[in-house]
Image (cartoon, rainbow, N blue to C red):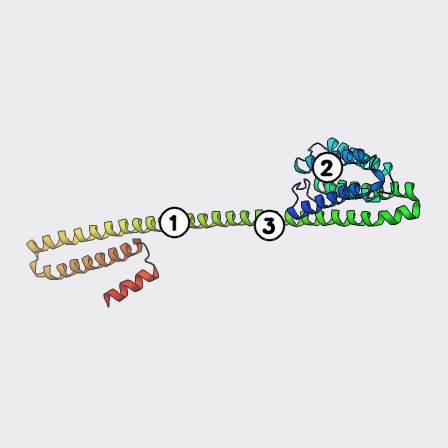
Amino acid sequence: MHSSTPDPRPGKIVIGAVYLLYAAIVIRTFANPNIRARLPIYLALEFLYLVLFTLTLWRPLRQPLWQHLYFVFQSLLVLVLIALRPRFDFMVILYVLLSFQAVMIFPGRTRWIWVAVLALLSSIPLMVGLGALQGLSLALMPMTIGLVFAAYVAVTQEIEAGLRNRQTLLAQLQEANRQLTASNDQVEELSAIQERNRLARELHDSVSQTMFSISLQARAAQIMLECEPDRLRSQLEQLQALTHNALEEMRGLIAHLRPQESEPARQTKSLSEN
């Protein structure tokens, strides 16, 4: 799946290969002794091509109309270089560089339309100037290089886009996990608070009832002390039992209200007691 906005930033190795190809064209232009009179024209057009290519490479055009106009102008510029001397078949390598740039700039189907157009432009001028068979034989190699170069850049973009998407997805999953952990902590804390509130209500209710019973038993013991002293002993025993039960119940409820000790803390406490 193609990205809607290709990444216009090429890698260092690719950039090195691109400018190495351009340097090869300039060197071959200098090395040919048959164009001494036209050498300034060749160098001027090649330099203009380089300036426009570099500017567009590092500061890509954002408007589609200007992008297409740029490729039309560069294609015509290369056609002029080829038309000056068709036997300089190495000039079609400039279309290879434009194919690379088309993949870097255009998204989706548009990039491959331009790659196909540039491949045709690599062959048609040579076939017209040198004959169909000889021109096609000379153009096949640059055409193949242009297609392979463009495909390599496109695949590299897809891989880099996949890595970026995976990193984004990983960051989103980590954030979701963090939020889920925080939510679980909040739920556990809320549950603990609710449980403590419930135990506190139970403690309040049970203590109130027990203290009320103890108060009644104490009042009854006071009355028996004055009226029936013989029954006072059993009444005091009941009062003692009631007080003991109330104390045990309070201890049990308070134990539930205490925060749970971690396992290492319990082991340390157990060892210290032993």
Disc number lying in front (3 or 1):
3
Q: Secondary structure at mark 1?
A: helix
At horizontal 12% and vertical 55% (from top left) the residue drawn is 221
Which residue has dot 1 on it?
Answer: 189
Find residue 50 and name its label: 2
Near mark 2 (Cα within 10 A), the count class, few <14, some 14-19 or many ≥20, is: some
Q: Secondary structure at mark 2?
A: helix
207 sits left or right of 107 in the view: left
Q: Disc 1 to disc 2, how far (Cα)? A: 67 Å
Q: Earlier in the sequence, mark 3 or mark 1?
A: 3
Q: Disc 2 to disc 3, how far (Cα)? A: 36 Å
Report the amino acid beneath label 3. Arg
At horizontal 18% and vertical 57% (from top left) the residue drawn is 243
Front residue (pair 151, 48): 48
224 sits left or right of 70 in the view: left
Find residue 166 and name its label: 3
